[in-house]
Amino acid sequence: MSPTERFHVLIATDGSTSARAAMTTAVRFPWRGGTRGSAVVAKQVRADYRRSILLAALDRTSEFTARSASRALRKRWPDGGARVVDASPVDAILTEARRVRADVIVMGWRGHGPVRRLLAGSVSRGVVRGASCAVLVVRRPIRELRHVVVGVDGSDNADRALSFVAGLEPSRGARVTVFRAVDIMHTPSHGLAPAGTRATVTAEVARINEGRRAAARKDLSRAAKTLSSAGWKVDQAVTDGAPLRELLATVSNVGADLLVVGAKGVTGLRHLLLGSVAEGALNRSPVTVLVGR
C-alpha cells in the first residue's frame, strides 16, 4: 500500500445477528487513523425469479439492509456507504473487496452442521479461502480489544498477520500473546541397537529439539519487539504440543478477545478433509479470528 492510499475496511452484511456483530466490531475496532470503511450486501436472484414478486421483495430487503449498514458505518466513517451486489454471497463479497481494494474483510461467522460444512462450506469459510486480503471473522462483538493471541510460525502470511496487529492502535494496557509451537523430533525406536548407539541417537535428537526451541524463542523475541514498538504489552508462549490444540488453549488461558493466524494456502482434497491451523481456528476458536495474508 502506497503512502497516498488509506487502509480500507470492507464489512459484509446481510442484516443477520452475526452481521450486526461484525458491524459493531468493525466500527469499534482500533484501526489506525485515516482508515476508510464501506459495506457490501449480496443479493442473489435466480434467472427464473427476475420477473416475479420475489425480486421486488429481495430488492426492498437488500436496500433496507444497505441503508441500515450505511447508518452504522457513519458512526465511525462519515463518508461510509453500502453497495448492493447481485451475486452469491461469496462472489459478491470477493468482487467488492477487489473493486475497493480492501485491506481487510470483516464478516460474521455463520457455520453450518458438520456434513454441510465438509461438503460445501459456509460463506465465511468461502471468503477466507478466496480472499487475497486479511479476513476478520467475528464470533461475537468486540467493543474494546484488550487481549490478542497471535500465532507465529515463520511463514510469510503469519508475518503479515503480525504486521496487521502491529498496525492497529492499541488501547491503554492492551496485550498481545505471541505463540509458537515447536515441531519436535521424537526419538526413533531402536531397542536392538547397542546401548552406545541408543545414547548417541537420544542425545542428537535432544540437541536438534533444543535448537528448534531456541529458533522459536528467537522468532518470538523478534515478534515481541515489533509489537512493543507499536505500543502493545507483549507476552510470549512456546509449546511442544500440537499447534492448534495449544493455540486454542492459550486463547482460553489468557482470556483473549481475538485470535490471529496466517493463512497457509493449502488446496485440493487435503484442504477439504484435513485443513490447516487457520481452518481449524475458524472451526473451533471460541473468539473472533483474523486470518492474515
Image (spheres, rainbow, N blue to C red):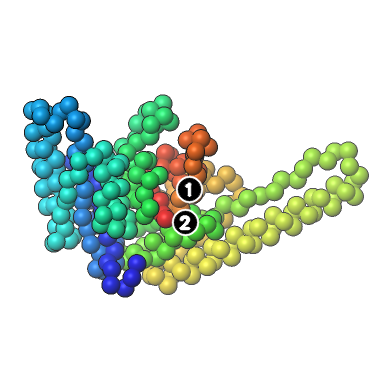
Q: Which residue is mark 2?
A: 157
Q: Position of residue 179 (x, y in %)?
A: 51, 55
Q: Are marks 1 and 2 in contact (CB under 8 Å)?
A: yes
Query: What kind of residue is marked 1?
Result: Gly
Q: Which residue is drawn at the image coordinates 45% and 42% (left, top)?
A: 279
**As drawn, is 138 to the left or to the right of 156?**
left
Q: Is residue 103 visible?
A: yes
Task: Using the image, determine if residue 174 lies above or below residue 10.
Answer: below
Residue 19's label in the rendered image is none
Name the foreground residue: 83 vs 161.
83
Number of numbered discs present? 2
Q: Residue at x 29, y 58 (%)?
A: 101
The C terminus sits in image quarter: bottom left
Residue 29 in sight: no
Residue displayed at 15% across by 54% down: 81
Q: Position of residue 51 (x, y in %)?
A: 10, 29
Residue that numbered label 1 is attached to = 265
- For the point 32% across and 39% down, the residue is 123
Percent position of residue 132, x then y: 38, 53
Q: Quadrant of the N terminus?
A: bottom left
47 relative to 165, above or below: above
Picture coordinates of residue 168, whole percent (x, y): 34, 64
138 up-or-down from 176: above or below: above
Q: Quadrant of residue 30?
A: bottom left
- What is the three-letter code of the residue carrying label 2? Asn
